Amino acid sequence: MQPFGILAAAACPLPLANLDTDQLIPARFMSRPRSAGYGDFLLHDLRRGADGALRPDFPLNRPERAGAAILVARRNFGSGSSREAAAYALLDGGIRCVLAPSFGDIFASNAVNNGLLPARLAEEQVETLLAWLEEGGREVTVDLLACSVAAGSHRWGFAIDPVWRTKLLNGWSDVDLTLSHAAEIEAFMAADRSARPWAWLDGAAGD
């Protein structure tokens, strides 16, 4: 997984609350293999009309938002079902960070496990950022090292679980995070074997 440090990129305003995972990627598109990519289905039913054509008025379809890697949305982003494909669709669609006041818990966990940053800003800060983008703002800098967001003259701190921050900064999975404590685990096992040899099968601790 690619580590996340500082991202300076075009941002897209998505002034919607309670955007759920079925909207992020409708279930009918989830039968294809992950390797085929899910980016074309990101927000499919919101971005496209009944005829399948892109809606020019939808934020992500506007020419000035081309190449956006940051989404700015309202509260409860990623609510609904636990589908990990919602994170796949965002990443395959070029999104590396979502800024919102709150996230669905399972979505946020899936996002982090795939290298996507769910950063929480206060609602008033999100509204200010949305307005700035609608007024012509484009590039936003998200700094996970400092847990900060910069947009024009605006500067804010954002919130994220510290364990998630560590995983994203290092590009770690849950297994990698566990292995980062290998020395402590080995020391505990050795001490426990010494204190309770009767609890161990034959062989050295860790065999």
Image: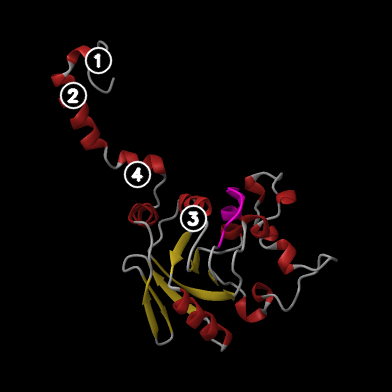
Q: CA distance from mark 1 to mark 3?
A: 39 Å
Secondary element under disc 4, as helix, strand or loop, is helix
Query: Pointer 2 and pointer 1: residues touching (CB < 8 Å)?
Result: yes
Q: From the viewer's perspective, is 158 left or right of 113?
A: left
Q: CA distance from mark 2 to mark 1?
A: 9 Å
Where's residue 9, x and y in %? Answer: 49, 74
Query: Upstream in the sequence, badge 1 or badge 4?
Result: 4
Where's residue 173, x and y in %? Answer: 42, 45
Q: Residues within 10 Å of mark 4 (few under 14, many from 20)?
A: some
Q: Nearer the viewer, mark 1 or mark 4?
A: 1
Q: From the viewer's perspective, is 169 left or right of 51?
A: left
Q: CA distance from mark 4 to mark 2?
A: 22 Å
Q: CA distance from mark 2 to mark 3?
A: 36 Å
Residue ID at (61%, 53%): 80
The residue carrying mark 4 is 177
Residue 200, numbered circle = 1
Q: Residues within 10 Å of mark 2 (few under 14, many from 20)?
A: some
Q: Is residue 45 above or below residue 10?
A: above
The residue carrying mark 2 is 192
Q: Which residues are magenta?
A: 77-88
Residue ID at (67%, 55%): 22
Amino acid on which disc 2 is placed: Asp
Where's residue 90, x and y in %? Answer: 59, 60
Q: CA distance from mark 1 to mark 4?
A: 26 Å
Secondary element under disc 3, as helix, strand or loop, is helix
Residue ID at (49%, 80%): 129
Query: Upstream in the sequence, badge 4 or badge 2?
Result: 4
Amino acid on which disc 1 is placed: Trp
Q: Which quarter of the image is occupied by the C terminus?
A: top left
The residue carrying mark 3 is 108
Colour basis:
secondary structure
